[in-house]
Amino acid sequence: MPFHQHLIDLKLEQLALDQVVPSLLDKGFFYVDNFLGELVGQLVLDQVKDMHHSGLLNDGQLAGRLSGVSKRHIRGDKITWVCGTERGTEAVNFLLTLVDKLISLCIGRLGKSVIRERSKAMVACYPGNGAGYVKHVDNPNGDGRCVTCIYYLNKNWNAKEHGGILRIFPEGKSYVADIEPLFDRLLLFWSDRRNPHEVQPSYATRYAITVWYFDSEERAEAKRRFRDLTASTQADTSS
């Protein structure tokens, strides 16, 4: 193992055990600044800007009953999904590798959740026209999403002027947590009803990359429910 790789692994382990796990268990969220460093963070930002400027981002969709419906007054972001293996996503892939490693170091320490997989990465841009995303829960109905990880890419962000704060309303707490979408900041929080949150209107271009880590058992159960529902719907339409 190269020496610098060993240092990165040690740093991630320390971050996971000393900060991520205690904060998630205590407050339900955690963020760290300077996650990749200026140089690599800039490479990720350049790749995201390239995706945006080449027209790869489309209006964000709504899940659930309104699935597939674009409602700009509810969410005004433009998104695309990437694996990190596509051409022009090498720096994004490096980010995903480090976040995967960080989460793997937390497994077994986050209660009963067993995390073995995650979503693709959602690259999102709020275009700066006052668009936001109203208060919502990522996983209100047990779809398997367990931990939400958001990496922010916004240099010289001034929340007073630009808005765009992610406000978390931790369940049963008397306070809210306001997270500014600052460049090279990584945010993690529980995806379920413990963390309703909103993106306040953004008045400058606001970039972020989000991945969701799945609780294996809940994910399998959600897939079973979906299969049963699909089968019963097909039976109804053919009878």
Image: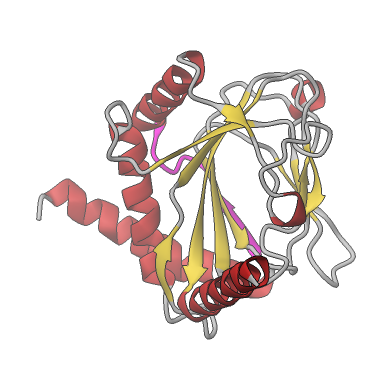
The image shows residue 131 at horizontal and vertical percentages of: 78, 27
Residue 42 on the magenta span: no
Magenta stretch, residue numbers: 28-37
Q: Residue furthest right?
A: 174
Characterize the magenta stretch by its predominant secondary structure.
loop
- Residue 162: quarter of image: top right
Is residue 45 placed above or below 187 in the rendered structure? Answer: above
Which scheme is used to colour this image of the protein? secondary structure
**Quadrant assignment for the N terminus:** bottom left
Total numbered labels placed on residues in the image: 0
Q: Is residue 111 left or right of residue 69?
A: left
Q: Is residue 164 left or right of residue 224?
A: right
Of 24 and 131, the residue lying toward us: 131
- Residue 239: quarter of image: bottom right
Residue 33 on the magenta span: yes
The image shows residue 28 at horizontal and vertical percentages of: 67, 67
Q: Residue at x 40, y 30 (%)?
A: 44
Is residue 132 placed above or below 5 in the rendered structure? Answer: above
Q: Residue furthest top?
A: 53
Q: Residue at x 46, y 55 (%)?
A: 119
- Residue 161: quarter of image: top right
Of 203 and 61, the residue lying toward us: 61
Q: Residue furthest front?
A: 239
Q: Residue furthest bottom?
A: 112
Of 219 and 135, the residue lying toward us: 219
Q: Residue at x 52, y 64 (%)?
A: 20
The image shows residue 158 at horizontal and vertical percentages of: 71, 24
